[in-house]
Image: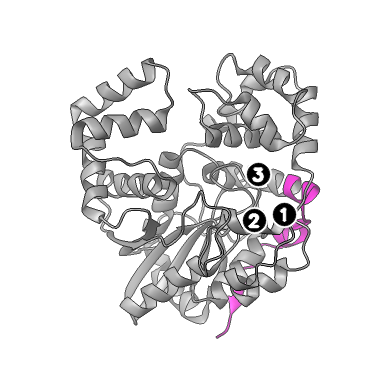
């Protein structure tokens, strides 16, 4: 039996995600699919419009066997840290194959670029040179790869694929790679094809456009009457105004305190705030993550104090998934979270705080969070 891992955010779960799972089952009829999933906020700092428990139910209903939580501490960081802990989680659960969607259809190109980053001494030198010229890290990385290999890696999912591949190579994990080419453009927010990006779906929802054709029925039934407007910006604005020193928060670099405080007073929404802070050196996504860390009070000190993966939290499983977990539990080195003990686990203390904030600004899931009972799909 093939054990396939997927790293996902499901913001929201749409036809493209269903397509990925179906393709895996088509290729490997006897397979078990484990999803490592972000919870309340995404890698780019966005609020998840489906809560973690609804995302778990939908994924199980659409073919997943086990859903594990990628803690907030790791799920809202740069692609390399996001990849480090998601792959470590999946490796702990003994996957033999990682499946991801990417813009390129050439897995060898991704592997070669990962090897350049890890083993070519000129790579770091070139990246530093480009950074010193004042450009941001993703552009510097892409420019260095282009110089050394003649290829470009500059789209969101290719960058994540590159980070996943580096983690597997660096740690010598016994994990194969399965690439499924994306059929939609992440940046496209206007297309009406059967498979469109999550960004496009969120944009349609904000503009009261029906999304029934773009998502599975489970997703549609939850979102069709849901107001996805939230109080994110209002609470963030209060936090920025009331704090004297923003530079204690993760990703807020030295010198940004004044720029953020100046920008908040001339911004009417989150998008305007990000654009007002944005510079050549700081990408949109980095600023979005940084603002999320301010909102959720994630400090540099907190981040530094947690050295490694503290636990594995199962959000849901199928019958097949439950049997698999029982069979491998003695081989897993990291504790499976059974008791919701924030005193024992600092990562969980942060997760609880972030869930409280999510519940305050969008949808109350505090009771489910503390109950900590995995969802079981009996099909």
Q: Is residue 190 visible?
A: yes
Q: Residue furthest bottom?
A: 379
Quadrant where the C terminus is found in the figure:
bottom right
Q: Dot 3 corresponds to which residue?
A: 349
Q: Which residue is mark 1?
A: 206
- What numbered label is drawn on residue 202? 2
Labelled pair 3, 2 in contact (Cβ < 8 Å): no
Image quadrant holding the N terminus, namely bottom left
For the residues bearing labels 2 and 1, Cβ distance under 8 angstroms: yes
Q: Which comes sooner in the sequence, label 3 or label 2?
A: 2
Q: Disc 3 to disc 1, how far (Cα)?
A: 32 Å
Span colored in magenta = 357-379
Q: Mark 2: which secondary structure? A: helix
Q: Is disc 3 placed on a helix, strand or loop? A: helix
- Residue 94 in percent (x, y) is at 35, 63
Q: CA distance from mark 2 to mark 1?
A: 6 Å
Classify 10 Å Cα crowding around label 1: few (below 14), some (14-19), many (20 and above): few
Q: Percent x, y for residue 345?
A: 59, 45
């Amino acid at each position: 039996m093939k054990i396939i891992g997927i790293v996902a955010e499901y913001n929201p779960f749409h036809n493209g995600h269903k397509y990925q799972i179906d393709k895996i089952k088509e290729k490997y009829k006897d397979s078990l699919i484990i999803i490592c999933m972000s919870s309340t906020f995404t890698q780019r700092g966005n609020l998840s419009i489906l809560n973690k428990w609804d995302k778990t139910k939908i994924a199980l209903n659409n073919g997943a066997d086990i859903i594990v939580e990628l803690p907030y501490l790791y799920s809202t960081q740069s692609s390399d840290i996001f990849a480090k802990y998601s792959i470590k989680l999946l490796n702990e659960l003994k996957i033999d194959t990682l499946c991801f969607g990417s813009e390129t259809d050439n897995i060898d190109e991704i592997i070669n670029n990962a090897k350049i980053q890890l083993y070519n001494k000129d790579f770091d030198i070139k990246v530093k040179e480009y950074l010193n010229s004042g450009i941001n890290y993703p552009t510097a990385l892409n420019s260095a790869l282009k110089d050394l290999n003649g290829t470009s890696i500059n789209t969101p999912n290719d960058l994540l694929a590159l980070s996943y591949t580096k983690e597997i190579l660096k740690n010598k994990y016994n994990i194969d790679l399965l690439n499924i080419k994306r059929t939609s453009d992440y940046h496209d927010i206007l297309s009406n094809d059967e498979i469109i990006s999550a960004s496009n779906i969120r944009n349609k929802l904000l503009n009261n456009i029906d999304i029934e054709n773009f998502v599975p029925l489970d997703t549609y039934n939850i979102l069709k009457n849901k107001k996805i407007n939230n109080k994110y910006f209002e609470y963030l604005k209060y936090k920025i105004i009331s704090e004297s020193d923003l530079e204690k928060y993760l990703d807020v670099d030295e010198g940004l305190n004044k720029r953020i405080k100046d920008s908040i007073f001339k911004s009417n929404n989150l998008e305007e705030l990000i654009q007002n802070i944005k510079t050549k050196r700081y990408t949109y996504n980095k600023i979005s993550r940084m603002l999320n860390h301010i909102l959720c009070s994630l400090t540099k000190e907190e981040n530094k104090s947690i050295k490694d993966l503290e636990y594995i939290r199962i959000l849901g499983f199928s019958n097949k998934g439950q049997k698999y977990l029982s069979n491998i539990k003695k081989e897993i080195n990291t504790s499976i979270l059974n008791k919701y003990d924030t005193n024992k686990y600092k990562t969980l203390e942060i997760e609880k705080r972030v869930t409280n904030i999510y519940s305050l600004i969008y949808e109350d899931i505090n009771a489910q969070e503390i109950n900590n009972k995995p969802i079981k799909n009996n099909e």
